[in-house]
């Protein structure tokens, strides 16, 4: 009987915790007019996609520059200056 009571209490706690977590989310904010907007979408856990921390460190230890490391991991991209001074990331 005690085990059933414990499991019931655990389920109620989990449900209440899940229901209250939605209220803590900040509302979506829009970018000021004229601000460039970049949307990055993805899925999964990221394995095999993008820059590997240990691999980048290995390249750096072998003398590769940051732009060579970035070019290795992000084919077809170019480095440049951005005209914006503030970047906001919403997760």
Image (tube, rainbow, N blue to C red):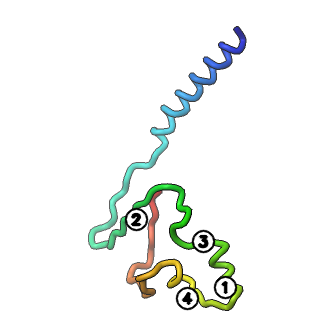
Mark nearest the camera among 3 and 2 is 3
Frontmost residue, 45 versus 67: 45
Question: On the rendered structure, is 70 left or right of 80?
Answer: right
Question: On the rendered structure, is 3 left or right of 18?
Answer: right
Quadrant housing residue 41: bottom left
Q: How far apart are marks 4 and 3 (CA)?
A: 14 Å
Q: Distance between the residues labelled 4 and 2?
A: 23 Å
Frontmost residue, 2 versus 30: 2
Where in the figure is residue 73, as x and y percent of width and height?
Answer: 52, 78
First reached walking from the N terminus: tag 3 or tag 2? 2
Q: Label 1 belongs to which residue?
A: 60
Q: How many labels does the image show?
A: 4
In the picture as drawn, the residue positioned furthest to the left comes out as 33
What label sits on residue 68 in the rendered view? 4
First reached walking from the N terminus: tag 4 or tag 1? 1
Mark nearest the camera among 4 and 2 is 4
Residue at position x 45%, y 71% in the image: 87
Residue at position x 45%, y 86% in the image: 79
Q: How far apart are marks 2 and 1 (CA)?
A: 27 Å
Asked if the residue at tag 1 contacts the one at tag 2, i.e. Cβ–Cβ closer than 8 Å, the answer is: no
Asked if the residue at tag 2 contacts the one at tag 3, i.e. Cβ–Cβ closer than 8 Å, the answer is: no
Q: Label 3 belongs to which residue?
A: 52
Where in the figure is residue 78, as x and y percent of width and height?
Answer: 42, 86
First reached walking from the N terminus: tag 2 or tag 1? 2
Q: Label 2 belongs to which residue?
A: 40
Frontmost residue, 60 versus 87: 60
First reached walking from the N terminus: tag 4 or tag 3? 3
First reached walking from the N terminus: tag 3 or tag 1? 3
Where in the figure is residue 28, as x and y percent of width and height?
Answer: 37, 53
The secondary element bearing badge 4 is classed as helix
């Amino acid at each position: 009987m005690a085990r059933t009571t414990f499991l019931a209490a655990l389920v109620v706690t989990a449900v209440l915790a899940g229901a209250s977590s939605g209220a803590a989310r900040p509302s979506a904010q829009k970018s000021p007019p004229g601000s460039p907007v970049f949307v990055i979408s993805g899925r999964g856990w990221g394995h095999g996609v993008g820059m590997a921390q240990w691999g980048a460190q290995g390249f750096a230890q072998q003398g590769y520059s940051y732009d060579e490391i970035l070019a290795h991991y992000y084919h077809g991209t170019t480095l440049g200056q951005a005209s914006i001074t503030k970047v906001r990331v919403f997760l």
